[in-house]
Amino acid sequence: MEGHTLCWTDIPVIDLDRAIAFYSAVLGAPVTKEEGEPGVEFGLLPHDDNTSGCLTLGGDNQPSLTGPLIYLSVDGRLNEAVAVVSANGGIVQQASHQIGAYGYRAVVIDSEGNRIALHSATA
């Protein structure tokens, strides 16, 4: 198998502009507002290959505290990312901590009510 196991994710949101501001601040890179089908807007997460995702409005998906835990890379800037969570409408559920040989993570609730993990190879 070539490439990454996770190739895309749709993160459900309630307020697209608020979610774009949250993820742009936490990821330290712009999340861009895009239009797919006419009248369907989404927030495209930063990416440099085919592994990424977007913020989506409506449909069957709803923000969740109990669904799959998606890890987003903030490599080398985990403390900075965690520091801006609260100021952008999120909640730090688990502060930065080591996850064995796999690096470090923090678990946060985003501005929309989704539980996500922020990951970095270094503290």
Image (spheres, rainbow, N blue to C red):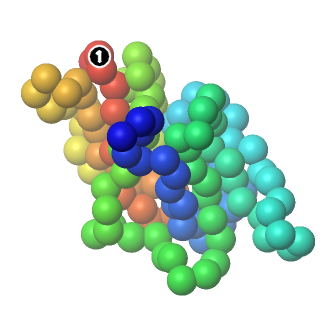
Which residue does the numbered mark 1 point to in the structure image?
A: 122
Q: Position of residue 102 (x, y in %)?
A: 20, 27
Q: Is residue 101 left or right of residue 21?
A: left
Amino acid type at mark 1: Thr
Q: Nearer the viewer, residue 53 or 122?
A: 53
Q: Quadrant of residue 75?
A: top left
Viewer-nearest residue: 29 or 10: 10
Judge from the rendering whether residue 106 lies leftward or rightward of residue 15; answer left or right: left
Percent coordinates x, y for residue 22 in the rendering? 58, 46
Please indicate, yes or no, whether residue 25 appears anywhere in the rendered image. Answer: no
In the rendered image, which quarter is residue 13 located in?
bottom right
Most distant residue in the left direction: 100
Task: Count up the numbered dots.
Answer: 1
Quadrant of the drawing holding the C terminus = top left
Crowd rating for badge 1 (residues with CA inside 10 Å; few <14, some 14–19, many 20+): some
- Residue 115 versus residue 118 in the image, above or below: below
Q: Is residue 64 above or below residue 100?
A: below
Q: Residue at x 13, y 23 (%)?
A: 101
Residue 67 lies, in percent from the top left, at: 32, 68
